[in-house]
Amino acid sequence: MTQVEIYTKPTCGFCHAAKRLLTGKGVSFAEVNITAQPDKRPEMIDRAAGRTTVPQIFINGVHLGGYDDLAAADHAGSLDKLLAG
């Protein structure tokens, strides 16, 4: 089964859009709210090669990027392949 992780903040519109896109595809994901868990922010930055913005999305442990990257992958048709494992 494909594992999707998403680092978010509750006030982030792009985070909500990413979660809507994933939910619309029937994909479950593990969400890490870095506002509620600020100790996870350095972990996110390290895993995302220095990116500090949210959301940061990982599929099977591989960094996909933020919402724009997720939407671009969906538009190109490669997201479904990534989610299929």
Image: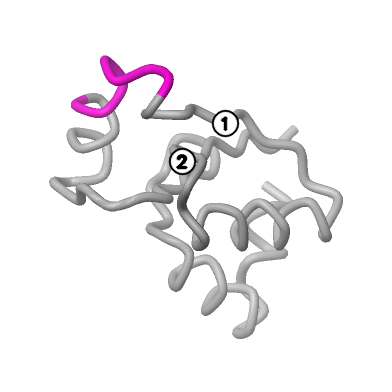
In this view, the residue in front, 3 or 38, is 38
Q: Earlier in the sequence, mark 2 or mark 1?
A: 2
Q: Secondary structure at mark 1?
A: strand
Q: Give the secondary structure at mark 2.
A: strand
The Cα atoms of the two marked residues, 2 and 1, are separated by 7 Å
Give the magenta-colored segment's residue range: 36-42
Residue displayed at 79% across by 51% down: 23
- Circle 2 is placed at which residue position? 8
Badge 1: residue crowd in 10 Å (few <14, some 14–19, many ≥20): some
Task: Give the x, y percent position of residue 30.
Answer: 61, 29
Q: Is residue 40 magenta?
A: yes
**Marks 2,1: beta carbons within 8 A:** yes
- Residue at horizontal 13 percent and vertical 46 percent from the top: 50
> Mark 2 is on which residue type?
Thr
Front residue of 25 and 81: 25
Residue depicted at x 49% and y 27%: 32
